[in-house]
Image: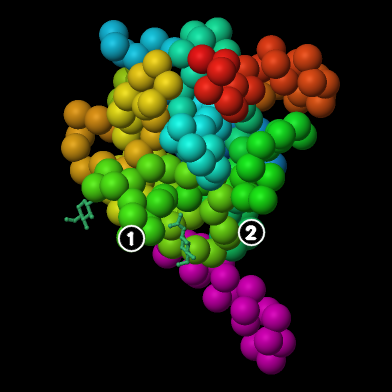
Amino acid sequence: MKNPSVVSFFITLLAAAVFTHGKEPVKDTAGNSLNAGELYFIQPVKTKSKNGGGLVPAAITVLPFCPLGITQTLLPYQPGLPVGFVLPLGVRSTVMTSSAVNIEFRANIWPFCKEFSKFWEVDDSSSAPMEPSILIGGKLGEQNSSFKIEKAGEGARANVYKLTTFYGTVGAIPGVWLSAPQLIVTNDTAKTLLVKFKKVDDATRTAATSSSRVENLGLRMFPFYY
Ligand SMILES: *[C@@H]1O[C@H](CO)[C@@H](O)[C@H](O)[C@H]1NC(C)=O
Ligand SMILES: *[C@@H]1O[C@H](CO)[C@@H](O)[C@H](O)[C@H]1NC(C)=O
């Protein structure tokens, strides 16, 4: 093989075959593979104690408000704020289990903490609590902004997942505002947050550009909304 591009093509194929071993496409609530080109609501799976809506960015300290954290809205009919997934290599567009992904809130209207990116990250600063918060303001390529999606259910709960990080599993604890569940990293399996991915349909996607619709979508970024 003289053509270097052919060689690198086969190396890429080989690498893809090796690295996808034991991995499978993550499925949305309709059973379709998660695609990096689409938008999804991340929704905690309802348990007796947790019966709210989807995940939204929210202030997690009284002052300063920024950077924002991530909270499950207490309003059961609010689907959350859409997220998109960014895959590191860009070779394929299907989001696989046990593979590094970046998670980003996608909203046209984003009134607060504009100086931060919309990527999720783990607070790995020296002042972080024992169970560090998930914050908004991550960067592609940084360890604290890398997540993995792992299967967490079988049978009727086959499309149920958990998120993991380099620092532990994503869980939830009662937050500062009316105890709405706030996302943190933990090793305590009792706190593990189980989630499902609901695809944002095209109608919602288009309508999401209007501010009244964003209100309806439950863009509850400020504590006053709880
Ligand atoms: C994430 O990691 C980067 C690079 O080490 C660091 O600059 C940044 O402060 C970290 N973010 C948090 C919230 O800990
Ligand atoms: C979870 O356990 C690992 C390995 O012991 C440790 O490095 C990490 O800091 C722990 N994370 C939390 C949030 O307790």
Can see residue 116?
yes
At label 1, the amino acid type is: Ser
Task: Tell me the element at label 1.
Answer: loop
At 59% from the left edge and 22% from the top edge, which residue is drawn?
A: 220
Out of 130 and 22, give the one closest to the viewer.
Answer: 130
State yes or no: Cβ of the residue under disc 1 lies below 8 Å from any atom of ligand 1. no
At 75% from the left edge and 32% from the top edge, which residue is drawn?
A: 109
Is residue 5 inside the magenta stretch?
yes
Judge from the rendering whether residue 222 lies leftward or rightward of residue 151; answer left or right.
right
Q: Where residue 90 is drawn, which disc sits there?
A: 2
Residue 108 is situated, as x and y percent measured from the top left of the image, at 77, 34
Out of 86 and 6, give the one closest to the viewer.
Answer: 86
At label 2, the amino acid type is: Gly
Mark before the other along the chain sequence, 2 or 1? 2
CA neighbours of label 2 inside 10 A, class few (<14), some (14 to 19), many (20+): few
Q: Quadrant of residue 174?
A: top left
Q: Dot 1 corresponds to which residue?
A: 126
Q: Which residues are magenta?
A: 1-24
Which secondary structure is most common in the magenta stretch?
helix
